[in-house]
């Protein structure tokens, strides 16, 4: 056995020991549902380390993410569903099956050709899963599903909304449901923005405004529930178009927004530090002074 294999088996054995009698009480109490939040948290920590190019931290974060796989697999083995061996076998089969240009006779000389082959293979896999489900249903006496498989099948609604929107529009584009070019996308963006602007005419006087300083919620306006629902829908439509603009540019909207969030955090922290040096806080100065500091924060980033 290779050194890598030995290390992997040791990690599996440690997980088994933690869940076994006499192991860790906390680990023994966990369930599939209780571990889910940690899986999401560890995934984001991996992404954070990559974005920061923190190569010293990334191995640890990847190890934490791998722990989630080992945890789920051990719990599944205990209930007789599957084991880590099944996870690895399925992964190996998928890698081989989806790379016929490496392990078979299919030709793909560019990444674009690889992606086209990949998407076609995934469509076939979805068809096979549907056929298997129909066969299983017929075997146990339940009525077989007669509807055609949805091109959107398999896209989880529990993933972050920006990522879900990206996957939904990408999948729909596979069957030609897409904007013809970027001009069409920008026209749609303008259309959605105008629909929101028109809807805002129904907003109670004196119109939308940010909550004022002071007690949280003290400046909140009362908006009819139906109007709030329609406003939320229009904002969602705007986000969806922006996600598609990112898709057209081969950019990850989730990553783009995370980077903007970090940029905002970095600049705001710089403002706070300058204010504290003069004995002030953001609450104690005018909006004009805050805006001036913000522009200074942007300028000092360009110079660094």
Image: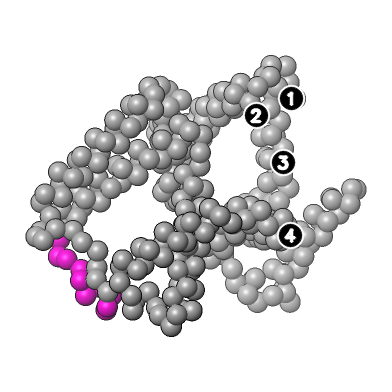
Above or below, comparing residue 294 to residue 172 in the picture: below
- Between label 3 and label 1, give the one nearer the viewer: 1
Residue at 38% x, 22% y: name it: 180
Give the Cα separation between the discs numbered 3 and 1.
Answer: 18 Å
* Residue 2, magenta (yes or no): no
In the drawing, what numbered circle is on residue 98? 2
The earlier-in-sequence mark between 3 and 4 is 4
**In the image: residue 66, left or right of residue 34:** right
Q: Percent from the top left, x then y, of residue 291?
A: 35, 63
Q: Which residues are magenta?
A: 214-224
Helix, strand or loop at disc 2? loop
- Between label 4 and label 1, give the one nearer the viewer: 4
The earlier-in-sequence mark between 3 and 1 is 3
Residue at 36% x, 67% y: name it: 290
**Residue 208 vs residue 97, the one in the foreground:** 208
Can you tell which quarter of the image residue 106 is in?
A: top right
Disc 1 designates what residue?
Answer: 102
Secondary structure predominantly adopted by residues drawn in magenta: loop
Helix, strand or loop at disc 1? helix
Helix, strand or loop at disc 4? loop
Above or below, comparing residue 166 to residue 57 in the picture: above
- Residue 270 can be seen, yes or no: yes
Disc 4 designates what residue?
Answer: 56
In the drawing, what numbered circle is on residue 89? 3
Q: Percent from the top left, x then y, of residue 125?
A: 56, 29
Helix, strand or loop at disc 3? helix
**In the image: residue 296, left or right of residue 203:** right
């Amino acid at each position: 056995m290779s050194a890598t294999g030995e290390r992997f088996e040791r990690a599996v054995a440690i997980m088994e020991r933690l869940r076994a009698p006499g192991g860790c009480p906390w680990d023994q109490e966990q369930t599939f549902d209780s571990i889910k939040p940690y899986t999401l948290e560890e995934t984001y920590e991996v992404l954070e380390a990559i974005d920061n190019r923190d190569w010293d931290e990334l191995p640890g974060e990847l190890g934490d993410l791998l722990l989630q796989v080992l945890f789920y697999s051990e719990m599944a083995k205990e209930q007789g569903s599957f084991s880590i061996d099944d996870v690895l076998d399925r992964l190996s089969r998928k890698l081989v099956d989806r790379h016929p240009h490496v392990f078979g006779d299919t030709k793909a000389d560019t990444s674009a050709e690889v992606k086209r082959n990949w998407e076609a293979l995934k469509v076939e896999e979805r068809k096979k899963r549907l056929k298997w489900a129909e066969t299983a249903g017929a075997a146990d006496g339940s009525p077989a599903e007669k509807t055609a498989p949805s091109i959107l099948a398999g896209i989880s609604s529990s993933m972050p909304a920006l990522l879900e929107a990206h996957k939904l529009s990408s999948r729909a584009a596979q069957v030609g449901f897409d904007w013809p070019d970027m001009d069409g996308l920008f026209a749609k963006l303008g259309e959605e923005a105008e629909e929101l602007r028109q809807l805002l005419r129904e907003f109670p006087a004196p119109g939308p405004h940010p909550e004022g300083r002071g007690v949280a919620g003290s400046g909140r306006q009362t908006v009819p529930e139906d109007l709030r629902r329609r406003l939320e829908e229009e904002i969602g439509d705007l986000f969806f178009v922006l996600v598609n603009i990112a898709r057209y540019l081969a950019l990850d909207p989730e990553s783009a927004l995370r980077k903007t969030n970090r940029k905002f955090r970095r600049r705001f922290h710089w403002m706070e530090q300058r204010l504290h040096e003069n004995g002030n806080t953001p609450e104690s100065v005018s909006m004009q002074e805050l805006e001036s500091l913000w522009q200074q924060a942007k300028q000092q980033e360009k110079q660094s």
